[in-house]
Amino acid sequence: MGSIALEPLDLGLVLLYLVAVTSLGVWFSRGIQSSKDFFLAGRALPWWAVGMSLVVSDIGAKDMVGLATDGYRYGLVMMNFDFIGCAFPVLVAAFLFMPFFWIAGVYTIPEYLGRRYNPAVRTAFAVIWALFMMGTVGTIFVSAAAMFEGLLGWGFWFSVAVTGVLVAIYTTVGGLKAVVVTDALSCIVLIVGAALICISGLAQVGGFGGLHERVTSIDWTQHHFQMILPADHPEYPWPAVLLGLGFVLGPAYWIGNQAIVQRAFGTKSQSQARASYLFCAAIKLFFPVLLVLPGLIAVALFHEELGRPGADWQAGSQVLPMLVKRLLPTGVLGLVLGAFLAGVLSNLDSYVNSASTLLVNDLYRPFVRGASDRHYLRIGQMLVVVLLTAGALLSYLIKTQFGSVFEAFQTFMAFFQGPLLALLLLGMLTRRATAWGGFAGMLLGVGTACFLNAARFLFGREAAVSFLWVAWWSFVAALLGTIFVSLLTRPYDTQRLRGLVCWIPADEEAS
């Protein structure tokens, strides 16, 4: 496709954004004196900033590149990840789970699971989450490199290095407060940039009518304007979308994703935690169009160059770079590149800060007791650099093994989100779930997910299982395993479960 030379105006806008976001992050790192300041921003974050941070923690570089690619491959069905996987789950999280977690005073989701079940469950999920977050950081690096390679001609590893250093500067010193403040700025820039791509693309194809006419005239796009696909569709059959996405991946993401819920943990009160989720849901109503529509525009304009998607399709990462290069004039190009950088930086800072929080509080602190608070703070800051480095090393493997970064991210989630949701629901809603029941359910659920994901390697590509079905069946396995073993083992007494089961209040509430 060839690289482009940025005009002075475009380059100035990109540099202005980079300087602004880095300076803002460093400025708000002032006053970070304790681990609570670093991990939870001293629980002093305003709800509106947290809501905007939630948006860009969910929607970032991997989604801009990945959903444009999968919008090209599959069409409007990709909008279901927000319409089905976000709207209802966010409301459930806002009115039931987030206020409850906030009152419990936990730093992480594994911490809650450890209190509710036992330390083995906490440690196992902490390890799984850490591996997932390193993989997610790798997908974000791949997204950044795809854009920088396609637009600026930068090499893969140079793109990864520049991106990692920028994030390390302010995330290492500023913690959650710096992350949320910079995310609020990035949210605005991201919306503007995505809207500019859609407006420019629609102008090129003759509006929505012209888009529909061009796309439907191509022989491999018969389902591109359908949000509900046939039950035999290989990737997104409607039963799997309903069960795997609507009942499992969506709720698990908004209820149990450490990178998401940690923002709510940093708010001033439980009512503000709830408000931040509702504000996020309102903003995200616009994103299905902003992120999936560019893929359809690319089908209409560039399908002859990009080719027909298939098992060995190699042009996927070039969908968004081609749109940006071909459609946007000087000045607008700089804004959109700034928006993409917003997505890269906000996604990276969210996941590395959350992974650092989890590693310190769930794996390091329980085994290294009695150290000073400043010691834990310094360990958390060092882990930011370690996690960025690990994600960078994983990025090349992700680039070569998956059809899109969005597919990679969802596949990683499917390994454990089903078991996680099963344990959270049974743990919070019933006192009968036992420690050994939770441990057995976790093992059975994660084992089921691993087996289903490995099917294509064991039995050939034709036996591959959609990650939506993996999520659903691993959830069912964990649910049944937890219930069965819990019925055979003794539950905790009521006093032990105070503040951990939603209908058993904490001691101070009971009084």
Image (cartoon, rainbow, N blue to C red):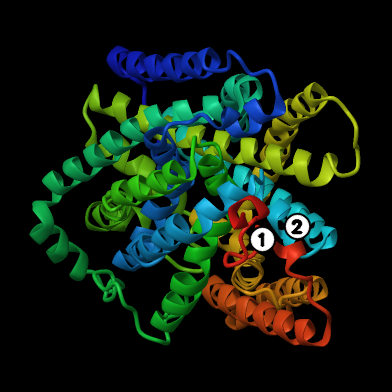
**Residue ID for mark 1:** 500
Q: In x, y percent, where is residue 36? A: 67, 30
Q: In x, y percent, where is residue 35? A: 71, 28
Q: Are marks 1 and 2 in contact (CB under 8 Å)?
A: yes
Query: Label 2's element?
Result: helix
**Residue ID for mark 2:** 115
Question: Which residue occupies 52% across, 17% down?
Answer: 28
Quadrant in which residue 47 is drawn: top left
Q: For the residues marked 1 and 2, what is the alpha-carbon distance in whole angstroms?
A: 8 Å
Q: Is residue 64 visible?
A: no
**What amino acid is found at the position of numbered circle 1 in the picture?**
Leu
Q: Quadrant of the N terminus?
A: top left
The foreground one among 84 and 132 is: 84
Quadrant in which residue 118 is drawn: bottom right
**What amino acid is found at the position of numbered circle 2 in the picture?**
Arg
Question: Which residue occupies 80% across, 59% down?
Answer: 124
Q: Is residue 246 above or below residue 207?
A: below
Q: Mark 1 or mark 2: which is in front?
A: 1
Q: Is residue 508 above or below residue 220?
A: above
